[in-house]
């Protein structure tokens, strides 16, 4: 008898079952293609959560405050700007600090896709298409979005939305159609 042939004479029913099993085993398993490109795109990265982003922001803030004290401290001590401005010094200091922080976050996000704090933790800010933000996106995200968060102390609580949204977006991310993701 040829090899690979099943003897059907003695046990026809069993032979058919064995033949069917053999055919099932020989059939290649076909994977079904992904139906939506959006699903495939979402699997390319992980969204950065609240705590990781908070640590990156804390690092950025500490770095900026240290730089500000090291740079402006000696200038303020060598000049009498504090005394010259008097009561207006606090307002001027606030405005200069706010502009300094805005410039840092806007320029770093536009040109590098991340601040130094985000880079340390392997995070990146991208649009919903996965590209770097345009100037318009950066101005909305860092300007309008952060002003909404930081103009009133109570609105800091809005940052907590990062922890509860499915794509880990804060209000400033939603305004600019952006995400913060983990780089691989």
Image: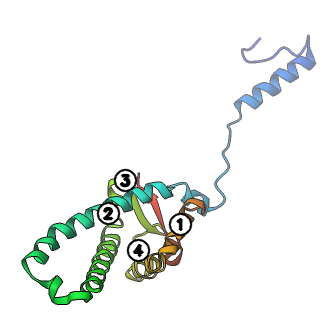
Circle 4 sits in a helix, a strand or a loop, which is it?
Answer: loop
Q: Nearer the viewer, residue 151 or 88?
A: 88
Q: Is residue 83 above or below residue 26?
A: below
Q: Secondary structure at mark 2?
A: helix
Q: Position of residue 137 (x, y in %)?
A: 43, 79
Residue placed under numbered mark 4 in the picture: 133
Which label number is shown at residue 60? Answer: 2
Q: Earlier in the sequence, mark 2 or mark 4?
A: 2
Circle 3 sits on which residue? 121
Q: Are marks 4 and 1 in contact (CB under 8 Å)?
A: no
Q: Nearer the viewer, mark 4 or mark 1?
A: 1
At 34% across and 75% down in the image, what residue appears?
106
Tag 1 and tag 3, C-beta contact below 8 Å: no
- Between disc 3 and disc 2, the foreground one is 2
Q: Using the rendered image of the protein, determine whether residue 48 is visible from the camera's viewpoint.
A: no
Mark 1–mark 3 distance (CA, rounded to whole Å) = 17 Å
């Amino acid at each position: 008898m040829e090899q690979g042939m099943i003897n059907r004479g003695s046990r026809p029913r069993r032979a058919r079952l064995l033949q069917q099993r053999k055919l099932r085993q020989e059939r290649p398993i076909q994977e079904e293609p992904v139906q939506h490109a959006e699903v495939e795109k979402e699997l390319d990265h992980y969204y950065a959560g609240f705590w990781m982003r908070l640590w990156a922001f804390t690092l950025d803030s500490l770095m900026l405050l240290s730089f500000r004290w090291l740079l402006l401290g000696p200038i303020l001590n060598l000049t009498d700007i504090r005394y010259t401005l008097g009561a207006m010094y606090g307002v001027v200091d606030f405005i200069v600090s706010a502009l300094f922080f805005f410039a840092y976050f806007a320029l770093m996000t536009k040109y590098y896709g991340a601040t130094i704090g985000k880079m340390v933790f392997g995070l990146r800010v991208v649009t919903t298409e996965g590209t770097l933000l345009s100037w318009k996106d950066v101005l909305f995200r860092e300007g309008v979005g952060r002003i909404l968060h930081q103009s009133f102390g109570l609105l800091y609580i809005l940052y907590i939305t990062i922890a509860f949204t499915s794509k880990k977006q804060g209000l400033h991310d939603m305004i600019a159609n952006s995400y913060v993701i983990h780089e691989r």
